[in-house]
Amino acid sequence: MDGEIIELFSPEYLDRKRKRNRRFAWMLLLLALLGLGFCVGLCIGVNTENTYRRMLWTIGVSALTGWIVIYFYVFGYRAAKREIVHGEHLQDAERETLEGEVEVSKLAYRIRGSVNVRKVTVKTWNGSRTVNICASRGRELAAAGKRLRLWLAHGYVTAYEVRHENT
């Protein structure tokens, strides 16, 4: 039996995620500043004839850019930041090995203040055990096959090896 080990939270993966998150934060800041600049530009051109129209435009632009920035901050930046911190925590932990048939749940749930996770049921020769995997990486594990060797830290999957039977 041989296979390839796939590390879910490798240092390279976490570095790529950090760099992407940093670029994303700069993009959000730029969007917020563009919205602010547009509102300031609208306020500069106010006179007695267009006051009401400019006020509506200013409110609309500031509300729209604010909601866009908040949405992408909550569902983009903050979620990625939580995954990075979670991955760093699991990298330093002691690992155990588990091998068996794997079934990944389709439902994800959020651990308060942490990442979204999916349940993974591993059926071994002496019973079954339920562990967790980061929801963003769950599809990857489900597509890998049924018979896997898993490396776990604190009940979370940190790496896996697809086991191929030689027949």
Image: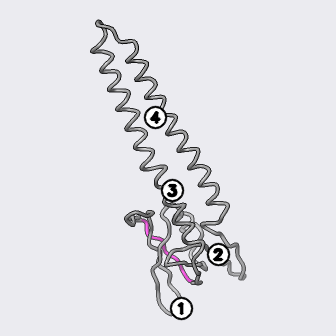
Residue placed furthest toward the bottom? 126
Q: Is the magenta region chiefly helix, strand or loop? A: strand
Query: In this rendering, which labeled residue sits more in front, label 1 or label 4?
Result: 4
The image position of residue 49, as x and y in percent, is 29, 6
Category of crowding for the residue at label 3, using alpha-carbon neighbours closer than 10 angstroms: few (below 14), some (14–19), many (at least 20): some
The structure residue drawn at horizontal position 50% and vertical position 93%, both measured from the top left corner, is: 126
Residue type marked 3: Lys
Please identify the quarter of the rendering in which residue 67 is found.
top left
Span highlighted in magenta in the image: 99-106
In this rendering, the answer to whether 123 lies above or below 15 is below
Q: Quadrant of the N terminus?
A: bottom right
Task: Report the label total.
Answer: 4
Task: Give the camera-side residue of 13 and 142.
Answer: 13
Q: Which residue is mark 2?
A: 161
Q: Are marks 1 and 4 in contact (CB under 8 Å)?
A: no
Disc 2 to disc 1, C-alpha distance? 18 Å
Residue type marked 2: Glu
In this picture, residue 73 sits left or right of residue 50:
right
Task: Give the camera-side residue of 137 and 93.
Answer: 93
Mark 1 falls on what kind of element? Answer: loop
In this rendering, the answer to whether 30 lies above or below 15 is above
Q: Which residue is mark 1?
A: 125
Residue type marked 1: Trp
Task: Give the camera-side residue of 1 and 75.
Answer: 75
Please identify the quarter of the rendering in which residue 93 is found.
bottom right
Mark 3 falls on what kind of element? Answer: helix
Query: In this rendering, which labeled residue sits more in front, label 2 or label 1?
Result: 2
